[in-house]
Amino acid sequence: MTNATAVSLGLDLVEPALDAEHPELADFTPLEDMLHLGSGELVSAPTGTHHIQYAEDGLQDGHEVLFQLDAPRQDIRDFLAEL
């Protein structure tokens, strides 16, 4: 679902693209390979509209990164500060 949403909204993917290397996702097309279907591209730094993939910490699945890692929380603070 995340890939479909990112492509349809034309979001840029901020490097590194983690889904291509993840063994559990080997049967799925990586987001980087689908960016051409929308208006997004692979970028090295966040832009106005972007998508960032974070690696899970091994304790919980990747859906919980907001509660596991500092970087996603900082990204949300930065986003809210720009509103």
Image (cartoon, rainbow, N blue to C red):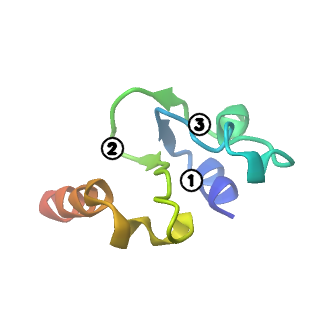
Q: Quadrant of residue 44?
A: top left
Mark 1 and mark 2: Cα distance apart in space: 12 Å
The correct choice, above or below, for 81 with respect to 9 in the image is below
Residue 48 got which mark?
A: 2
Query: In the drawing, does residue 75 fall left or right of residue 67?
Result: left
Q: Secondary structure at mark 1?
A: loop
Crowd around label 1: few <14 · some 14–19 · many ≥20 (10 Å): some
Query: In the drawing, does residue 26 fall left or right of residue 50?
Result: right
Residue sitting farthest toward the left: 81
Mark 2 and mark 3: Cα distance apart in space: 13 Å
- At x 47%, y 48%, the residue is 51
Q: Which residue is mark 1?
A: 9
The residue closer to the viewer here, 80 or 59, is: 59
Please name the amino acid that badge 2 sits on.
Gly
The residue closer to the viewer here, 13 or 26, is: 26
Query: In the drawing, does residue 16 fall left or right of residue 20?
Result: left
